[in-house]
Amino acid sequence: MSRTLSSSIFITDWEGPFGKNDYALELSAQYLPNGDNFFTLLSKYDDILADVLKRKNYGAGDTLKLILPFLKACGANNKAIIKYSTENAQLLSNSIETLRFIQSIMPSFVISASYCICLMYISEHIGLPKNNIYCTDLDIDKYELNEKEATRLREIAEEIGVLIKQLMKSDQELGAFLEIPENASRLDDFAEKDRIIIEKLDRFFWEEIYRMEAGRIIREVEVKDSLGKAKAIEEIIEELEINPQEAMYVGDSITDALAFRFLREKGGLTISFNGNEYALREAEIAVISEDTLVTSILAYIFKNNGIGCVRDFIKEWGPEVVKEYCKDPILKSHINDSYFTKLPKVELISQNNINQLIKESTNFRKAIRGKKIGALG
């Protein structure tokens, strides 16, 4: 049954549900020696600090500020970052059409850990108002490095490069970067070789870099990390004065975990789109798809029929139920017969299927976004 829901809102992460890029990793690869592996190591370190050790005043996604002193020391500036992100943007199929369609039926917002200067094209090319984009504000040009600190930062990057070589597997592909033991909660739970690496990284970042003038970047940049995303959702809901049950959120990674948890506890709709384990363990619905059209479909049903109907719809997921519910002419114009030949996987997450979904979704995200980006937390 249709209903009137003028207050429904759509909120999404960007990198993953729509964008294939991981700009922080890609910028690291652009500026730092062995930068992709450098970022991969720091990303796993980030997972450990945020999810395992639960380090005070550290949030999942704060890798994005840990790499900034190194990017600055190696020549990164605002203009170059904007140029790279604009020229190398990669989107999932139908991303622009999906966002434009959803904007036409309800207020839409993007909350991303990515740097705002990397996401300028969203507003410019998709028409999403800048005020509806929450991201990590960065003006790297305002930070000055003296040559002594810049040299030392490059030396530290080289020392971390040595650690990476020690961690690399013989196949030289992704490397066994800091394995997290099951049920680990403290540093002593890690294997000795990994504990040594974690302690070295702690010394580099919190005893040396943090105390440099360059440490201002780490101290001052506020990443839209996992907690930041949850707070942004709460802020949007309060500003619009809507019931949290009228909000839906789409995400894919560890930086979405607290956002998922917050909204789900408040009765909202939470969707993992090609998500990793962190996302799948907190979301209600799993989507595995190379195309964003499914997000349009779920948003349309949520807007017109409510969260309960979305759940019922997913239980019956298939060509006939899609045709039955999707009456909007614009939406119907995108759903052709070929779409039904290979429908994306859409399931309610339960204890019975979560392990299989983690396996399938993790493998699929690597295939869609590349092994290195897909393997990140």
Image (tube, rainbow, N blue to C red):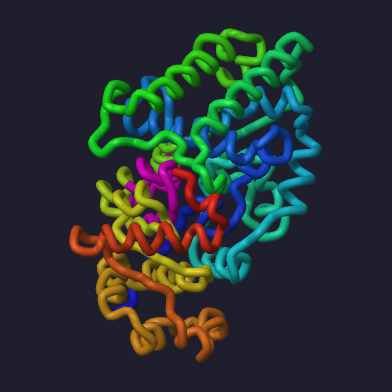
Which residue is drawn at the image coordinates 79% and 38% (left, top)? 80
Residue at the extreme left: 352
Is residue 7 visible in the rendered image? The answer is: no
Which residue is drawn at the image coordinates 46% and 82% (left, top)? 342
Which image quarter holds the N terminus? bottom left
Q: Is residue 339 left or right of residue 320?
A: right
- Magenta-colored span: 235-260
Q: Is residue 274 left or right of residue 260?
A: right
Is residue 123 visible in the rendered image? The answer is: yes
Q: Which corner quadrant of the image does residue 314 belong to? A: bottom left
Q: Main secondary structure of the magenta part?
A: helix
Is residue 304 placed above or below 184 in the rendered structure? below
Which image quarter holds the C terminus? top left
Residue 255 lies in magenta, yes or no?
Answer: yes
User: Total label count?
Assistant: 0
The x and y percentages for residue 313 are 30, 76
The residue closer to the viewer here, 56 or 328, is 56
The x and y percentages for residue 187 are 32, 22
The x and y percentages for residue 32 are 70, 33
Is residue 179 placed above or below 357 in the rendered structure? above
Residue 309 lies in magenta, yes or no?
Answer: no
The x and y percentages for residue 29 are 68, 40
Is residue 329 placed above or below 21 in the rendered structure? below
Which residue is drawn at the image coordinates 46% and 72% (left, top)? 294
Residue at the extreme front: 170
The residue closer to the viewer here, 29 or 262, is 29
Which residue is drawn at the image coordinates 51% and 34% (left, top)? 41
